[in-house]
Image: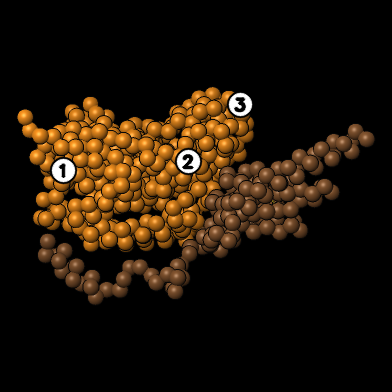
Amino acid sequence: MISAITKAFSNLLKKPYTCNYPVTPVIKPKNYRGLIKFNDEYCIWCDKCEKVCPPNAIIFKQFEDGHKVYNYNPYLCIYCGDCIRACPKTGDALWQCEEKGLPSISKDAPNDDWFILEKEAKQSRENYKAIKAAKKKS
Amino acid sequence: MKKTINIPYGSQHIALLEPVRFQFETQNEKIVGVKADIGYVHRGIEKACTSTFEYKQIPSVVARVCGLCAITHSLTYVMAVEQIIDVNVSEKAKYLRMLMVELDRIHSHMLCLSHTAENAGYEALFMQIMADREIIMDIQEAISGNRVQFDFVCIGGVNRDITDEIVKFIIKSLNELQPKIEDIFDMFENNWSLSLKYKGIGAITKENASIYNALGPLARAAGLETDVRAESDYYPYEKIGYKMILEQTGDIYGRNRVRLREILSSIDMIKNILCDIPEGNIIEKVKGKPNGESVARLEAPRGEIFYYLKGVKQAMLDRVRTKTPTFSGIPAMVEIFKGQEYGDVPAILASFDPCMSCTAK
Ligand code: SF4
Ligand code: SF4
């Protein structure tokens, strides 16, 4: 009991446990799991990352000539790293950096625009398939 | 006849961390009847696992059932899947998994102790324990790369290896934590005013614990020997010096003691794990689609967690069933409340360490 009281008073003289975030940055450990980065020069467009991603944070939109565009939603991503492990070109085409994802504000439209894009991407794939099938026939 | 008054406790209440509702029937402050309603945070995760996500994605999904048991949920699921698709996990991966589970136990028990202190009116003790808990969070962050959502286990092993640097960091941090836990232990043990709030309150007998299916620290505090770590030999727990921790009193004081002693024993176990992590791969290749049924059990910080899976040779599973420790423990909790003073409810409830996001899923 007495030791607890002395401790309580001695704590008054100590520095606080918490840090003054965001003025003082938080120390992140090495290999912190942060945002996903992409480089289209090395990508072989195999779509493996898109398929494994649990929250569908990576989406490829396909154009009529067959080329694809990578889309990434940092607000949906859970930084699980499954895409990195699935990618055959890890490190060159896709890698995980140590940068922390920021919370979104409404102007980022993390949901609505993304869901529209999701639908468009799906449609674009089907369109491309249809074009290809038609070409084969003719 | 005495007048009975019904007092609702929750779903929003100052002493509740998560939404749950208890309806207490009281006579002169004494509780004579309890009803529990637990479905406030239902998110349909079991359904999502069979309709939206493929079986390889589910470890990340079930990890988000609960922030405290992130590792135990995904690990139990992964163990169940590994049984169906016949993957043998390397010894090294098993050791790394045990390491994370024991770290999880330490920080979860510390959280419970802090809330028990807070709900009994000891705000400063709450803050002290929460601050010390950061040590464990930092260790977990160093191992897995994230503070809460570890995404550490995967089907076939674990995702990340551990380096010598991290091993050194863990041992240093644990050596720092140990005297702090002993200090807290001393406080819970010898502080007179804390004992007024805890000793003899919220007690359950061994017989009742067994009849009402108490589990985890709740059962072990009453002297009931139940612990999945002792009952299954999937993980080599005897090798790392596991001992079952039992108390006889069955009250809040007993539960606190079980938790504190388990923290100390987990610290020892972690040191043993780090001493003899075997060599080997951390991950095995996984092929095929699950076909069949399986169950897996694991000792989560709050008691036994159980997964049942059924696969029909498709990427999506047919059934995923989770039974969480708090859900199984509700009958015992209701029994304990009967006969107690209404004023003691917050502390008793916190000492159960209930996790509603697990329970309602
Ligand atoms: S880290 Fe996980 S959630 Fe994020 S894009 Fe990769 S697979 Fe998707
Ligand atoms: S998995 Fe890698 S190579 Fe394949 S599409 Fe994704 S980024 Fe490109």
Disc 2 residue crowd, few under 14, some 14–19, many 20+, Cα 10 Å: many
Q: Give the residue drawn at x 44%, y 37%.
A: B76
Which numbered disc flags the more N-terminal residue, 3 or 1?
3
Residue in the foreground of this view, choosing between B262 and A112:
A112
Q: Position of residue B36 (x, y in %)?
A: 28, 35
Task: Tell me how many marks there are.
Answer: 3
Secondary structure at numbered mark 2: helix
Q: Position of residue B174 (x, y in %)?
A: 34, 58
Q: Amino acid at mark 1?
A: Tyr
Q: Is residue A1 above or below residue B213?
A: below
Q: Give the residue drawn at x 26%, y 50%.
A: B15
Left/right placement of residue B356 relative to residue B54 reads left
Q: Which of the numbered marks, if any, corresponds to residue B313?
A: 3
Q: Amino acid at mark 3?
A: Lys
Q: Nearer the viewer, mark 3 or mark 2?
A: 2
- Chain colored orange: B
Q: Which of the numbered marks, if any, corresponds to residue B185?
A: none
In 3D space, how far apart are the residues under numbered discs 3 and 2 (Cα atoms)? Answer: 21 Å
Q: Is residue A11 above or below residue B118?
A: below
Res B243 → quadrant: top left
Tell which subunit mark 2 falls on.
B
Q: Are marks 3 and 2 on the same chain?
A: yes
* Tags 2 and 1 touching, CB below 8 Å: no
Secondary structure at numbered mark 1: helix
